[in-house]
Image (cartoon, helix red, strand yellow):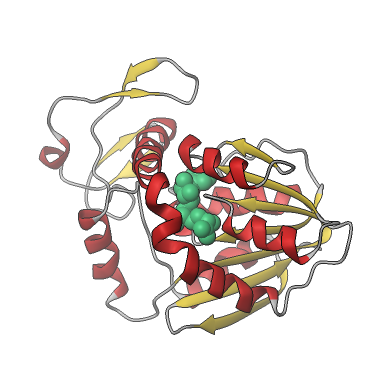
């Protein structure tokens, strides 16, 4: 069970019907987008919270998919370039991009070295459709970061770009990325971050303004600790463009 800490009346109202990841329609409780952070309360089974919030993400990113590259390709492409300047995977490396979206990073990796074995995963079928159109030879699966459909110890690198702040169960997702990495494999995660006290308010505002599922910006220290807790070693962090944090961890 996952604790939801909002006062009960805030989640009252008709329960929406959601299509679950298993394909059937079912009623899930109407949950506040900020379920993860909030107040005093009551609890829902973890899988119901996961499903409902993931439904928000899927709906939102499916709607965004059409114009996503028009809006975000250039900034994300430029940022990815700064990362690929110091992460230069050698030929033959097996690489997974979690939350790959429309495949901006996968495409850059493909152009960087045609001898990389690339895989992508995203929760939004519309984002995946666009990625697949660009990258016919890359295997891109639909799925959630919290339950990666891959065997243990198979990737040399896992990338997670601009996606982690959408994950409800962030630690579980990090554990999954750790699990699928080979020993000595590396996770390269980059995401917006904020160290200030304002982060708490920022996180609430984001969830009120946007409907991308549950969104949480972490601090540099929180991210480091999460990496450490999951078992990563040789953790490195770099700040770029004042709001982005790159965290790299190695599996022992
Ligand atoms: C802001 S986009 C970033 C996409 C891409 N990595 C990029 O840099 O352009 C966030 C992506 O994360 C995906 N996403 C959100 N929650 C997810 C989850 N739980 N598991 C996998 N992907 C998820 C969304 O569908 C979306 O494509």
- The reply, left or right, for residue 152 in relation to residue 51 is right
Q: Residue furthest right?
A: 92
Q: Is residue 173 above or below residue 156?
A: above
> Can residue 169 be spotted in the picture?
no
Q: Residue furthest top?
A: 24
Toward which corner of the image does residue 238 lie, by quadrant? bottom right
At 23% across and 43% down in the image, what residue appears? Answer: 32
At 66% across and 63% down in the image, what residue appears? Answer: 108
- The reply, left or right, for residue 161 in relation to residue 34 is right
Q: Residue 75 location in percent, x, y?
A: 47, 71
- The reply, left or right, for residue 92 in relation to residue 55 is right
Q: Residue 40 location in percent, x, y?
A: 22, 49
Q: Residue 245 location in percent, x, y?
A: 52, 75
Return the residue nearer the eye: 224 or 160: 160
> Can residue 180 be spotted in the picture?
yes
At 77% across and 62% down in the image, what residue appears? Answer: 251
Q: How many marks?
A: 0
Return the residue nearer the eye: 142 or 25: 142
Q: Is residue 240 above or below residue 132?
A: below
- The reply, left or right, for residue 77 in relation to residue 72 is right
At 70% across and 79% down in the image, what residue appears? Answer: 85
Return the residue nearer the eye: 20 or 4: 20
The quarter of the picture where the N terminus appears is top left
Toward which corner of the image does residue 184 lie, by quadrant? bottom right
Return the residue nearer the eye: 68 or 22: 68
């Amino acid at each position: 069970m996952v604790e939801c800490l909002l006062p009960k009346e805030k989640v009252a109202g008709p329960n929406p019907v959601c299509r679950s990841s298993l394909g059937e329609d079912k009623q899930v409780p109407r949950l506040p987008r900020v379920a993860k952070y909030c107040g005093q309360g009551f609890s829902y089974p973890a899988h119901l919270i996961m499903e409902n919030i993931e439904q928000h993400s899927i709906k939102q990113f499916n709607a965004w998919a059409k114009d996503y590259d028009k809006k975000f390709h250039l900034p994300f492409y430029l940022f990815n370039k700064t990362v690929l300047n110091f992460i230069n995977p050698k030929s033959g490396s097996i690489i997974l991009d979690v939350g790959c979206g429309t495949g901006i990073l996968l495409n850059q990796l493909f152009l960087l070295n045609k001898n990389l074995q690339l895989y992508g995963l995203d929760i939004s079928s519309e984002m995946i459709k666009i990625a697949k159109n660009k990258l016919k030879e890359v295997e891109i699966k639909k799925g959630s970061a919290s339950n990666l459909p891959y065997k243990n110890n198979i990737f040399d690198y896992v990338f997670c770009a601009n996606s982690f702040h959408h994950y409800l169960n962030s630690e579980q997702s990090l554990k999954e990325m750790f699990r699928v990495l080979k020993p000595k494999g590396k996770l390269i995660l980059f995401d917006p971050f904020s160290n200030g006290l304002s982060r708490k308010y920022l996180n609430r505002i984001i969830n009120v303004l946007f409907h991308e599922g549950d969104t949480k910006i972490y601090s540099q220290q929180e991210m480091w600790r999460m990496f450490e807790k999951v078992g990563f070693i040789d953790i490195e962090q770099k700040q770029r463009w004042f709001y982005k944090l790159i965290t790299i961890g190695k599996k022992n």
